[in-house]
Image (tube, rainbow, N blue to C red):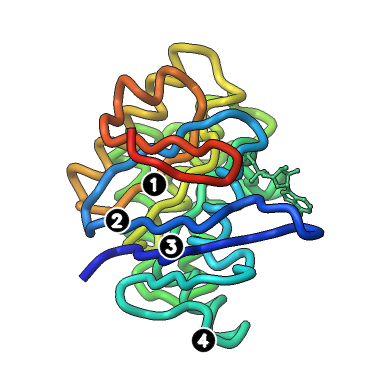
Amino acid sequence: MHAVETVDLTKTYNGVYAVQNVSLAVDEGDLLLIDGRSGSGKTTLLKLIGCLEKATSGTCTIFGKNIDAMTENELSDFRLNTMGFIFQDYNLLPTLTVYDNIELPLLLAGKEGRKKRVEDLLTAFDMSHLRDKRPDELSGGENQRVAILRALSNNPHIILADEPSSNLDIGNSHLIHETLSSINKEFGVTVIVVSHDPISRIHITKRYIMTEGVLRKE
Ligand SMILES: Nc1ncnc2c1ncn2[C@@H]1O[C@H](COP(=O)(O)OP(=O)(O)O)[C@@H](O)[C@H]1O
Ligand SMILES: [Mg+2]
């Protein structure tokens, strides 16, 4: 079974193609990069795969489930339990501590054993010393690593990252792409990274390129 399979996936805004006839099969455990210029449709494609936008036409199947057939409630459950998201601007909740931000998906999913899970993640990623800080007390690189742990906490099958390093310096950019790649290798999570940061190519060798809504393998 594929982790993600799209067939002729298309999204238009006001009649203009943002994503055009994308047919993509992602195997479970894949790590792939979607590269391309600004405005080429990368974020839109990631939102379609992440069930955050509805396609205009075509199909998107995630682990054999046709997401187009799901209701809004089913979709939000499915997202919560299947996917983790990482964004360019981290999207952490500013009033919550590092610990609480990472725990949030587990709370929403009503999971048991939350404390151990969050503490294990903080330890594994050498971030326990940051547990009581709030996002505005952290550097960009630290914030993005917290966002990665939040994306991981509920044990997702897929992680979708949209330009995760574009607000970071070179050192942190390496660190973030290295972390994403190690998550893929160590936990077997399928990881799809959208990025036009050249550093991402050093860490992710399976590369697709988006040009005016059309996706091709490098
Ligand atoms: N919500 C929206 N409404 C109208 N146009 C949009 C919307 N989102 C994206 N677009 C358009 O779709 C195209 C692709 O955008 P996007 O997927 O954000 O590209 P990228 O992530 O590669 O920069 C752009 O022309 C953009 O202006
Ligand atoms: Mg984008």
Q: Which mark is residue 192?
A: 1
The reply to whether dot 2 and dot 1 touch (C-beta < 8 Å) is: yes
Mark 3 vs mark 4, foreground winner is: 4
Q: Which mark is residue 26?
A: 2
- Could you tell me which secondary element the residue under label 2 belongs to? strand
Q: Which residue is mark 3?
A: 83
The amino acid type of the residue labelled 2 equals Val
Give the Cα distance between marks 4 and 1.
Answer: 23 Å
Q: Which residue is mark 4?
A: 69
**Residue 65 in view of the camera:** yes
The quarter of the image holding the C terminus is: top left
Dot 4 or dot 2: first in sequence order is: 2
The amino acid type of the residue labelled 1 equals Ile
Q: Is residue 36 above or below residue 7?
A: above
Q: Which residue is at a point 29% across and 56% down the rendered structure image?
A: 26
Dot 3 or dot 4: first in sequence order is: 4
**Residue 100 in view of the camera:** no
Q: Which residue is at a point 49% across and 40% down the rendered structure image?
A: 146
Give the Cα distance between marks 1 and 3.
Answer: 11 Å
* Horizontal and vertical percent position of residue 142: 51, 29
Some atom of ligand 1 lies within 8 Å of the CB belonging to the residue at label 2 = no
Mark 4 vs mark 1, foreground winner is: 4
Some atom of ligand 1 lies within 8 Å of the CB belonging to the residue at label 1 = no
* Horizontal and vertical percent position of residue 172: 46, 19
* Horizontal and vertical percent position of residue 217: 34, 39
